[in-house]
Image (cartoon, grey):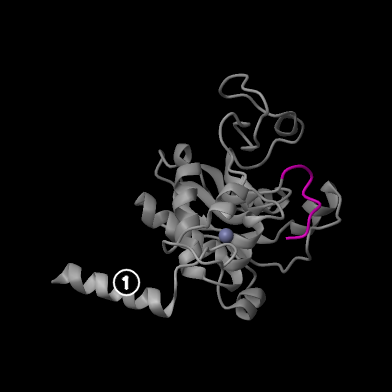
Amino acid sequence: MRRALDTMRRVALDIVYPPHCLACGCATEASNGLCGACWRGIQFIERPFCDRLGTPFHHDLGDGLLSPEAIAHPPVFRRARAVALYDDGPARRLVHRLKYGDRVEVAGLLGRWLARAASDLLGEAPVIVPMPLHRERLWRRQFNQAALLADELAQVSGLTSDAFLLDRVKSTTPQVGLSRAQRAANVQGAFKVPPSADLRGRTVLLVDDVLTTGATANAASRALLRGGAKGVDLAVFARVAGTGEIAI
Ligand SMILES: [Zn+2]
């Protein structure tokens, strides 16, 4: 009886909201997925990749290797993992839909992908912390897309997500077009662990939708470490390859 009702409900929903691709919106056979073209268009990041930055290597030279970028500019966070490369294709459309479209469905899909991409960061049972938005921006947008992802990841992985462990206390201008030093200066002091948060001895998995230059993630990681965290790792849906001189 219950199953029959579920089926009826699903059929009714499919009539009202026909299954569509979560990236491009075209009609699909099943709900909450992608069409074939979008699926093929996403550049999923697979091993081998840099152990610190998670950036893909073109050749497999063995595990635990670091990229020249990670050696020249070591990040504040320990390791970063990303589901896919950010490009002008379906990855960008999914990020936009997470912000402005089918939020819950897209967050569900990306959260499941994130759990897979960040699987080697989940072993220490970290507390999941979404990259915070400044209060003014949160007020304008009404919700934080990183928090949606963090909640989905927590649900899939059986961990806890806590958006109250990190505050964004400074509103920052977009990082596009700034030099490495300017980007770091722009986000300096932008984050703070509130006095009520107790991070001592805890490992944090910071979650964001897109990683561009790493300057924001570094500033947030620095604040978390200052707030007592034992270590900070980073999980994002998409990361920009190269210098990050690209508008999101
Ligand atoms: Zn599509």
Q: Position of residue 78 (x, y in %)?
A: 58, 38
Name the residue at 46% across, 36% down.
120
Q: In this orientation, which residue lies closer to the viewer: 181 or 17?
A: 17
- Crowding at label 1, few (<14), some or many (≥20) Cα neighbours within 10 Å? some
Ligand 1 contact, mark 1 (Cβ < 8 Å): no
Q: Position of residue 228 (x, y in %)?
A: 53, 48
Q: Secondary structure at mark 1?
A: helix
Name the residue at 38% across, 53% down.
156
Q: Position of residue 175 (x, y in %)?
A: 79, 58
Q: In this orientation, which residue lies closer to the viewer: 95 or 221?
A: 95
In the picture of the structure, the residue carrying the numbered disc 1 is 10
- The outermost residue toward the left is 1
The three-letter code of the residue at mark 1 reads: Arg
Assign the magenta stretch its main secondary structure.
loop
- Residues in magenta, as a range: 241-248
Quadrant assignment, res 68:
top right
Name the residue at 58% across, 56% down.
208
Camera sees residue 164: no
| Quadrant into which the N terminus falls | bottom left
Camera sees residue 51: yes
Q: Position of residue 111 (x, y in %)?
A: 47, 55
Name the residue at 77% across, 42% down.
242
Task: Write down which quadrant ligand 1 falls in.
Answer: bottom right
- The outermost residue toward the top is 61
Quadrant assignment, res 32:
bottom left
| Quadrant into which the C terminus falls | bottom right
Marker count (numbered)? 1
Position of residue 39 relative to residue 165, above or below, is: above
Q: Is residue 12 magenta?
A: no
